[in-house]
Amino acid sequence: MRRFNFLVQDWNRNTGNTKGRFVTFFFRIGNACCTSRILKIIMLPYLLFYRIFFEWILGIELPFNTKVGRGLIIYHGQSLVVHKNVVIGDNCILRHSTTIGNARSGGQCPRIGNNVNIGSNTCILGAIKIGDNVVIGAGSVVVKDIPCNSVVAGNPARIIKSRIFLNTEL
């Protein structure tokens, strides 16, 4: 039962989004295969199927060994490219024609926080950190860190709205 819950952890967040459910379910199967070397060897035919079908046929490069938190939503998916070393937090939204990866060969990749909404045709490149509760507008090119609770847009992306929450104790 525990394995099944891992496989469908994105299911409810993709309600009404059949393609998103399909992609995230198969991604999680591949993700589960990376938990042990033996399982990875046994599931090698599946992992090859995943790479061929999703990357070559559907055009969705979301490597099965990418670290992605719970509640991932994928809208449309075409031309989605995510580097295997990217780290994505919980409840993130990815849209089509988005590239997330290193800025140069062998460079470091972005770390994306929780509750990040990434618009279509967006590029997020380099060793940067995207904070929690960030909205990235469509067509943005993000090459610098983005603080939590921000809305960014443009090329290069600039903060257009920021909410700062103060923690005060009574």
Image (tube, rainbow, N blue to C red):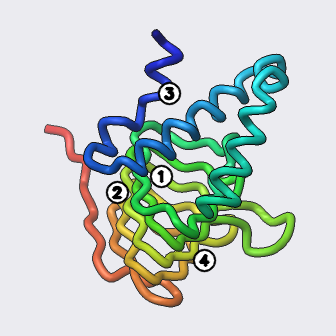
Q: Quadrant of the C terminus?
A: top left
Spatial CA span between label 4 and label 1? 15 Å
Residue 134, given in percent of the width and then of the height, sits at 37, 63
- Of the residues under marks 2 and 1, which one precedes in the sequence? 1
For mark 3, give the secondary structure: helix
Disc with the residue nearer the chain's start (4 vs 1): 1
* Left or right of 8, for residue 60: right
Which residue is at the front of the view, 107 or 9?
9
* Residue nearest the observer in this picture, 26 or 5: 26
| Residue depicted at x 65% and y 34% | 30
Tell me, for residue 143, which label it has, or none. Answer: 4
Label 1 near label 2: C-beta < 8 Å?
A: yes
Q: Nearer the viewer, mark 1 or mark 3?
A: 3
Dot 3 corresponds to which residue?
Answer: 7
* Mark 2, secondary structure of its residue: loop
| Alpha carbon distance from label 2 to label 3 | 25 Å
Label 4 CA crowd tier, 10 Å (few <14, some 14–19, many 20+): some
